[in-house]
Amino acid sequence: MKIGVDIVEVGRLKKLAKNRRFLAKVYTPEEIAYCRARKNCAQHFAVRFAAKEAVWKALGKNGTALKDIGVVNMPGGKPQILIRGRRRKGIDVSLSHTENYAVAVALIL
């Protein structure tokens, strides 16, 4: 079992989300569209960034790029992790965000 945790300041991602090159380097086109469609898009960008970092840490920082780690929501809202566009069994994440902070915990069984 491996675990990864990350916390992000929403304000930091709010600034970074204005940079198209940053978005293209870190997020999938689907993630960008999802976040931009939300009322508080900076919170959604931040929590996805935290999820990517948490999964990356749990994987052991093995050369997987952040953009290779995708975060999608299942029909019921539960977040699901994709690695290079494919669902990877055994990775669970818990995400939460407030106006100022986003946090993610990733567990790999």
Image: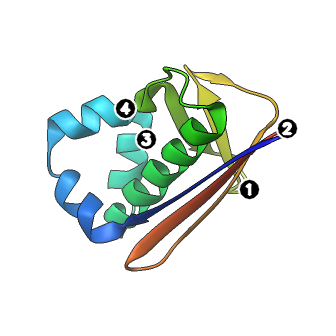
Which residue is denoted by mark 4 in the rendering?
29
Helix, strand or loop under label 2: loop
For residue 76, the mark is 1
Q: Quadrant of the N terminus?
A: top right
Sequence order check, earlier mark of 3 and 1: 3
**Count of labels in the image:** 4
Q: Viewer-proximal residue, 65 or 57?
A: 57
Decide if residue 66 is on the left or right side of residue 36: right
Helix, strand or loop under label 4: helix
Q: Position of residue 93 (x, y in %)?
A: 69, 51
Helix, strand or loop under label 1: loop
Which residue is denoted by mark 2 in the rendering?
109
Question: Residue type at mark 4?
Answer: Pro
Sequence order check, earlier mark of 2 and 3: 3
- Residue mark closest to the camera, 3 vs 1: 3
Report if the CB atoms under discs 2 and 3 are less than 8 Å apart.
Answer: no
Decide if residue 29 is on the left or right side of residue 14: right
Q: Position of residue 74 (x, y in %)?
A: 69, 46
Camera sees residue 37: no
Residue 108 position by quadrant: top right
Q: Position of residue 105 (x, y in %)?
A: 65, 56
Q: Residues under labels 3 and 1: Cα distance? A: 17 Å
Q: Residues under labels 3 and 4: Cα distance? A: 5 Å
Q: Residues under labels 2 and 4: Cα distance? A: 28 Å
Decide if residue 101 is on the left or right side of residue 79: left
Q: Quadrant of the C terminus?
A: top right
Which residue is denoted by mark 3 in the rendering?
31
x 36%, y 43%: residue:
33
Helix, strand or loop under label 3: helix
